[in-house]
């Protein structure tokens, strides 16, 4: 990563313009060319330094349901349960964590009813209870990472 | 609860066309417009409106924080009195090293925590140092807390709505 890569990561975690030629506008800000910005973002995505480029949508404001849930899965059964949970399209993220509640996933569905149905299906297929932890209130989201 | 903005069919088509990313070309909104079958100006007007209403949180790059060296990701969970959680949420959420901050339901008896703050550091030592700063802020409202480190990403696809 060179200085321009860092500048792209540090300056573009929000505020990408909505206009006819947004990359050209960003290029002026970062003292480079439109083509350079486009190809750098492509390379950073390809190399895995960036996981996405584009609009970040707010699921609940689109009428969707987004919820964190956790399960207590013993080590011996972790692989089987991971396969079941990951195979569900409603599961957006899934993390292993070092705790008795060892599997933490985010369910994204378009309606609360689909959310309840997905939880039920996970419990049925895995045989473990799900601790549903929908947010009651959001105080902040959106850290900027310095590169 | 957050307010729900009303999206019409065209908005939904724009969401579908852009939720996995914007095209990497000189005029990305024109490319989206061609895909959706409307004028580029209308795509831009609608996307600006969605930014304003909060349907779009922001437009830009999302770094993979592991790749940037933030290898210790601690989900800190706290048991704080219900009547103080909002006040503490505002304070802790304002810390520049906290990426997500929520009030969530307890599951008694085995899950007493009602307050969550994600803390990212280059290593666990850094996370623990940052957690001490949260502890200082929360003071006597801290009736117990834990740090749950992620040990593996099992799946990460981002959010999707169906077509």
Image (tube, helix red, strand yellow):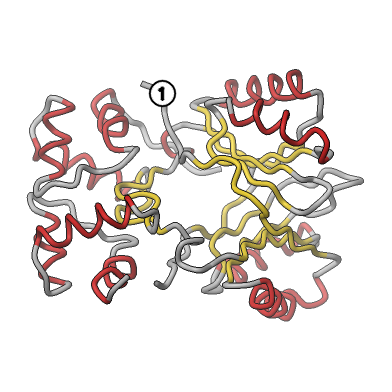
Tell me which corner region of the image, top left, top right, bottom left or bottom right, holds residue B39. Answer: top left
Q: Tag 1, which chain?
A: B
Quarter of the rendering occupied by the N terminus of chain B: top right
Which residue appears at 9% of the width and 49% of the height? B26
Left/right placement of residue A88 relative to residue A132 reads: left
Quarter where residue A34 is shown:
bottom left
x and y, in percent, of residue A94 in the image = 61, 41
Say which residue appears at 38% left-offset and 51% top-offset: B57
Q: Give how far across and how far down residue B132 sits, in percent.
A: 72, 79
**Coordinates of residue B143 in the picture (x, y in percent):** 86, 66
Count of residue discs: 1
Along the line of sight, the residue nearer the viewer: A70 or B138? A70
Q: Residues within 10 Å of mark 1 (few under 14, many from 20)?
A: few
**Measured along the vertical axis of the image, is residue B122 above or below residue B52?**
below
**Residue corresponding to mark 1:** B162
Above or below, B108 against A109 in this view is below
Task: Describe the element under mark 1 as helix, strand or loop.
Answer: loop
Residue B10 placement: quadrant = top left
**What residue is rendered at 29% in x and 63% in y?**
A12
Give the residue at x 73% y 64%: B84
- Counting from the top left corner in percent of width and height, residue A95 is at 64, 46
Q: Name the residue at the right extreme.
A: B109
Quadrant containing the C terminus of chain B in the rendered view: top left
Left or right of residue A140, residue B132 in this image: right
Nearer to the camera, A47 or B108: A47
């Amino acid at each position: 990563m060179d200085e321009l890569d860092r500048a792209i990561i540090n300056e573009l975690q929000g505020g990408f313009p909505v206009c006819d030629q947004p990359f050209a506008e960003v290029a002026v800000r970062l003292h480079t060319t439109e083509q350079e910005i486009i190809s750098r973002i492509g390379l950073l995505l390809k190399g895995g330094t960036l996981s996405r480029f584009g609009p970040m949508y707010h699921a609940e404001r689109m009428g969707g349901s987004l919820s964190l849930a956790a399960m207590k899965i013993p080590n011996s059964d972790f692989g089987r349960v991971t396969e079941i949970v990951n195979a569900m399209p409603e599961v957006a993220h899934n993390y292993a964590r070092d705790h008795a509640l060892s599997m933490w996933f985010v369910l994204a569905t378009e309606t609360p009813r689909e959310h309840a149905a997905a939880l039920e299906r996970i419990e049925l297929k895995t045989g473990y209870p799900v601790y549903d932890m929908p947010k009651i209130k959001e105080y902040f989201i959106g850290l900027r990472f310095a590169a | 609860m957050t307010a729900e903005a009303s999206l019409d069919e065209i908005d939904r088509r724009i969401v579908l066309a852009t939720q996995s990313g914007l095209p990497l070309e000189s005029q990305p909104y024109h490319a989206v417009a061609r895909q959706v079958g409307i004028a580029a100006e209308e795509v831009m007007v609608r996307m600006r409106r969605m930014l304003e209403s909060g349907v779009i949180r922001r437009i830009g790059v999302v770094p993979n924080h592991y790749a940037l060296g933030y290898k210790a990701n601690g989900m800190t969970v706290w048991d704080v009195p219900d009547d103080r959680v909002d006040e503490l949420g505002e304070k802790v959420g304002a810390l520049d090293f906290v990426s997500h901050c929520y009030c969530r339901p307890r599951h008694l008896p085995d899950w007493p925590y009602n307050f969550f703050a994600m803390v990212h550091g280059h290593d666990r030592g850094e996370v623990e140092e940052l957690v001490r700063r949260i502890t200082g802020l929360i003071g006597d409202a801290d009736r117990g807390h834990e740090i749950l480190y992620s040990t593996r990403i099992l799946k990460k696809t981002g959010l999707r709505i169906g077509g």
